[in-house]
Image (cartoon, rainbow, N blue to C red):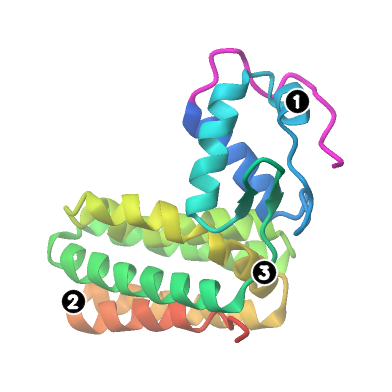
Amino acid sequence: MPTPAPHGIHKRSLLRDDVYASIRDAIVDGTFKPGERLRDPELEAWLGVSRTPIREALLRLERAGLVMAQPGRATIVAPYDPASTISAQQVVASLHELATRLAVPALTGRQLSAMTDANARFEQALENDDVEAALVADDEFHGVFVASCGNTMIPDVLEQALPLLRRVERQRFSSYAGRHSVAQHANITRLAGMGDADGAALASRENWLTLGVES
């Protein structure tokens, strides 16, 4: 399994969430390919941590559908599974719809401005073919609703469901199809600014359902 060369990415005091995020991101960005075997010693050398947080991270990734554990044999990167990805998309779309509906009545002008700024950076990233920056800006845009909705279960469930969609998001944001999200974001912001919680919620849901998951 080709792992990145160790270069002091993490310290020994690395938190479990950081180990999880590092392996998750390496799977999503294609560093670890579908079907590749994830070997504990190589992950330990790369991340500079003990086996315990790595095994915990792999268990979380298995629950998220990104790895497959073969008892007594190996842990491998899960191949793309359309059915699981569609299921994750439905959950993510519904949760963002709920978060938007709950958040809109309490949104401030500053938060609406933050959404507009995030969408501008999102558009610029797409024009620059910078997928990583587009993903960050997209997360920041939708994150305004999630952070303001008042329901602490929503981000917890999103953390489990969203990673499966990252592969699809990366493909969309690296193609012309991703440009449509700019206008969708602008419409969501407009509706939220009008106080139209239902309209913004439905527009947010539609935004997530247009990712183009292949069945």
Give the Cα distance between marks 2 and 1: 50 Å
Which residue is more in the foreground, 164 or 38? 38
Of labels 1 and 3, earlier in sequence is 1
The amino acid type of the residue labelled 2 equals Ala
Dot 3: few (<14), some (14–19), or many (≥20) neighbours within 10 Å? some
Q: Pointer 3: what residue?
A: 80
Callout 2: SS:
helix
Type of amino acid at the residue the image marks with label 3: Tyr
Vertical placement of residue 194 versus 128, above or below: below
What residue is shown at x 62% (from left), y 45% (from top)?
A: 71
Where in the figure is residue 95, as x and y percent of width and height?
A: 30, 67
Near-viewer residue (107 or 158): 158
Give the magenta range: 1-15
Q: Amino acid at mark 1?
A: Pro
Residue 96 drawn at (x, y percent): 33, 68
Q: Please indicate, yes or no, whether residue 39 appears anywhere in the rendered image.
A: yes
- Label ID, residue 197: 2
Residue plotted at (30% across, 62% down): 112
- Rendered view: 211 above or below 110: below
Residue at x-position 44% and y-position 61%: 161
Q: Nearer the viewer, residue 9 or 71?
A: 71
Quarter of the image where one finds residue 6: top right
Decide if residue 196 is in sight here. no
Query: Which circle marks residue 215 in the picture?
Result: none
Name the one closer to the observer, 161 or 210: 161
Taking the magenta stretch, the answer to whether it contains residue 9 is yes
